[in-house]
Amino acid sequence: MLVLVKQAVAAGYRFVQLRDKHAADQDMEDLGRSLLPYLRAHQVELIINDRLSVAQSLGVGLHVGMDDVDPRIARQCLGAAAWIGLTIHDQLGLAEQYQDCVNYVGVGPIFPTQTKKDSKRLLGTKLLQDICRNSSVPVVAVGGIDLSNAHQVVAAGPAGMAVCSAVCLAADPYQSAYQLCQLWD
């Protein structure tokens, strides 16, 4: 894992999210603790998916879905400096409802994805563009984004995009991460 993270950071990534629905909290915390010195040395934010207690223990950010802890509670627990994200799928009203406590909203899946088995209906880049134009909160596009379609995502106007398989499963993770980062320049 550390090798992949180092390659992504060297390529230009500024955020790393730890997401493992099946790992024990202690395992997530141990992994986060092992990554933190490197990430902090490179001014990269660590965000934990769904697990407020792990984010609190590590003193890092949190990403939640609507079935997880309320973003306002997360903000109270993690403080003003923590990055907090909320998956809204395509429910723009949720971005407005939580604009006072989240730094960004996750929108997607944009394309078919193997990373999340229970994903909602595909949104595509047209709906992504509409959401980006109308959201008062920065939008991060998620779901099925890779080198073959990332340029379409960037053109839709999000503040960022989340990728997993495009880097983690690539023959050359650094090169894939680098090419994806270059789309933002």
Image (spheres, helix red, strand yellow):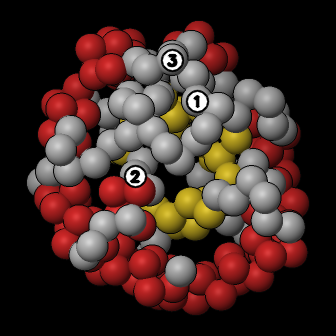
Q: Is mark 2 on a helix, strand or loop?
A: loop
| First reached walking from the N terminus: tag 3 or tag 2 | 3
Q: Which residue is drawn at 50% across and 64% down?
A: 16
Looking at numbered disc 1 in the image, what kind of residue is underneath it? Ser
Pick whichever, 6 or 56, lies toward us: 6
Q: Which residue is drawn at 40% across and 52% down?
A: 163
Q: Residues within 10 Å of mark 2 (few under 14, many from 20)?
A: many
* Relative height, residue 111 to residue 128 (above, below): below
Q: Which residue is drawn at 18% across and 44% down?
A: 148
Query: What residue is shown with label 1?
Result: 119
Q: Where is residue 25 in the image (x, y as percent from the top left)?
A: 85, 67
Query: What residue is shown with label 3?
Result: 121
Q: Is mark 3 on a helix, strand or loop?
A: loop
Looking at numbered disc 2 in the image, what kind of residue is underneath it? Val
State the CA–CA distance, disc 2 to disc 1: 15 Å
Query: What residue is shown with label 2?
Result: 163
- Seen in the image, is 60 located left or right of residue 158? right
